[in-house]
Image (spheres, rainbow, N blue to C red):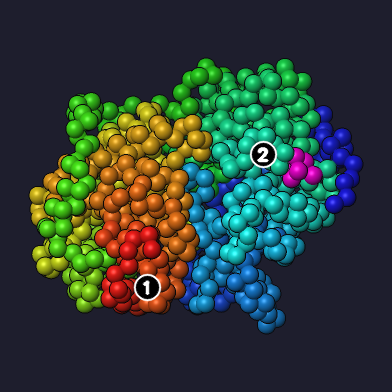
Amino acid sequence: MTTQPTPRSVARGTAAGAVRPAPSALPAATPVGYPRIGPGRELKKAEEAYWAGRIDHAEFARRTRELRRATRARLAELGLDAAAAAPESFSLYDQVLDAALALGIVPDRFASVLAADGAGDQAKADDDVLFALARGTVEQSPLEMTKWFDTNYHYLVPEIGPGTELRLTSTRIVDLFTESLEDGAGTRPVLVGPLTLLLLAKAQDGAPESFDPLDRLDDVVAVYAELLARLAEAGAPWVQLDEPALTADQRLSQAELAEALQRSIGRLAARADRPQLLVTTPYGGIGDLLPTLLATGAEAVHLDLTRGELPTVAQLDGVDTVQLVAGLIEGRSVWRTELPTAAARLAELRRRVTEAGGAADAISVSTSVSLQHVPHTLELETSLSAELVATLAFADEKIIEIVTLAAGGIEPGAVDGPRSVPRAFDGVQVPSVRERAAAVTSADTERVAYEERAEAQRQALGLPDLPTTTIGSFPQVGEVRAARAAHRKGTLDDAGYEQAMKEEIARVITLQEELGLDVLVHGEPERNDMVQYFAENLEGFATTEHGWVQSYGSRCTRPSILFGDVHRPAPITVGWATYAQSLTPRPVKGMLTGPVTILAWSFVRDDQPLGDTAAQVGLALRDEVTDLEAAGISIVQVDEPALRELLPLREVQHADYLDWSVRSFRLATSGVDTATQIHTHLCYSEFNVVVGAIDALNADVTSIESARSRGEILEAIDPGAFPRGIGPGVWDIHSPRVPAAEEIAEQLRRARAVVGPERLWVNPDCGLKTRGYSETEASLRHLVQAVREVRADAEVPAGA
Ligand code: GLN
Ligand code: ZN
């Protein structure tokens, strides 16, 4: 790579706004990112219509174009009307996938998909390739999907090998910028940075043991350089490179990270043919990496100042040549910022920057992270109480906050004042809930030894080896959704609704019996969402009408708002579970969502430690678990798919987190008899990170993701360290692909060799709610057939 003279002296103004026309400083207010699904979930609707063949590609392209136009207009209206003020947040599916595709990081198994010619329609061909990688094809399973830092957003994991040919293969990012010029002043292109991209990537299948994706850093940087040159050519004054990997502990030491930063951002900044660079570091503090980042030559650096501390004067060494983008507004909560506190922190930051030799006005006000994790706007909500609304801010309201803060005129309060507007109204503090939580003792989180439980459960349940089950939900057919919606609207009365749900439950029970599954479920037809359903039935939560956030691709969730003390006014699931059990002699699993997941997928209160909130939820669920048991349900599953997701990004904080999260789960599940079997379900691939905590949950059976990571998880399951029942998912339900019985049998044989036949359970890797009946029936049939074959094998000893 040729190194060019640093453009720093040319590119930097003396202070914000001082150099015009080009190069220009970043505007005084700018968020890191904005939701892309659209206030009416336009992206989701267009995608699902296109995938189902209800609209053609031209119509799909028209709709997504219209969404981007509306988004840019909205942002301009909110005050982000200057060039580069609005981040270009749009992505058809995922920003990590966009970066991987731009660079040609596509696994070899998709070679034929890439080679397919567009039959004259290049735009359609490009989108189809992107969707093939994201969703899989008939022949190929999709890229693995995993959680983005400690959020509930999922990204697609790039796969790269030593031989992956890297070159600029997609100019989607450039095209979006060019398009933004048509709509106004032009946005700021946003790209996952080279370091984060490779730290999130995994080695392609077949790569040598010793290969680390980071080995390709220089090659990747070369393609980024080309992409930046294209963006400069297109006239982009700024480009944003997101490097959130700097805020999490990595497999690299801090010194190695600093070196890699210099070798990536530093080299890019050294080139002349590029836009000015803003490097963002959302999701936490970067501590002592700041001086290195300030010295890379990037013109602007963003810091998360809600999770991270205000930098010290020493850490600001080098800030004289850099514009700081201060992430003072919490971007992932829904709470309204206490602006005087934020103004005081901004003033303190200015003071420190000045002391470090920087210009006090070379600071932009921003959000801590992209606003993609909060809903579009509070304006659409009509049913929230006025006192609650007065304490809330969604994406648009947060943009107004940063614009207001940047404009000055807010009288600074105390630097350590409240971060959000204080909440003091009915339900925030409930004395009886607090008294109960205070009276908890360690006996409330203990059960008898596993061996004793296992024996009692074997006798009570009489299950075969390799018992088959599902994770809980069955496909949500149109009639079920329609009945729920009509009931909500009041056009279907309680009796009619109950009848409709019972019919669905009966159908699902009959189907499972016919398929030959061993442990049945009622199918969860009454649940719109596994967290929202409980939020609606517990006190302490508010639910929104339009508060959708993207989970992955077209998948959106509507997190509830946990604002007050949590308790259970009445049984929630007992009626449905006992009805299902009355229809069959086989055991029906009760199905609950665990406290950590309820917290992770809600917007939680920030006025008390998370552990205190988790304990309240755990106690509310404990009441439900013991009521299920008393009603004759012998197996209860408490899902904790989010256990890994809430794990702090810094190792020093792990112990405390695992302590309260495990305790809340055990509070929920330790009130039952020896013979009652507790299951839990987790869905992600980095099982090894929390294997100790999963063990500490003390569940009798744990089902986990593993189909999508093609069984890699099994290697992490050391039978010694994890001595209880385990169900590695053998069907990836995130894709419409139907696995063959042979393929499932092969996975089962591998799993049985690792964990032994006594503890192995057989199940899909997640709930079936998003699947259709045809692929569900076919896949479950293959699953049962595979188990029958494997059960018939000669006995294979564990570890063989
Ligand atoms: N029981 C839930 C279901 O089957 C679990 C979903 C999940 O893990 N995300 O839908
Ligand atoms: Zn799951």
The residue that appears at 27% across and 66% down in the rendered structure is 466
Within the magenta stretch, is there residue 265? yes
Above or below — where is 781 with respect to 488? Answer: below
Q: Amino acid at mark 1?
A: Ala
For label 2, the crowd category at 10 Å Cα-Cα, with few meaning under 14, some 14 to 19 and many 20 or more, is some
Q: Amino acid at mark 2?
A: Leu
The residue that appears at 11% across and 57% down in the rendered structure is 460
Q: Could you tell which of marks 1 and 2 lies nearer the N-terminus?
A: 2
User: Could you say which disc has been placed on residue 677 in the image?
Assistant: none
How many labels were placed on the picture?
2
Q: In the rendering, at what x and y percent does residue 532 appear?
A: 32, 50
Magenta residues: mostly which secondary structure?
A: helix
Question: In this rendering, would 692 be left or right of 179?
Answer: left
Q: In the rendering, at what x and y percent does residue 462 appear?
A: 14, 63
- Residue 736, quarter of the rendered image: bottom left
Above or below — where is 23 with respect to 771? Answer: above
Question: Is residue 766 something one can see in this rendering?
Answer: no
Helix, strand or loop at label 1? It is helix
The residue that appears at 56% across and 57% down in the rendered structure is 157
Which range of residues does the magenta coloring cover? 262-267
Within the magenta stretch, is there residue 559? no
The residue that mark 2 highlights is: 257
Which is in the foreground here, disc 1 or disc 2?
1
Question: In this rendering, would 7 be left or right of 95?
Answer: right
Quadrant housing the C terminus: bottom left
- Residue 424, quarter of the rendered image: top left
The residue that mark 1 highlights is: 745
Disc 1 to disc 2, how far (Cα)? 42 Å
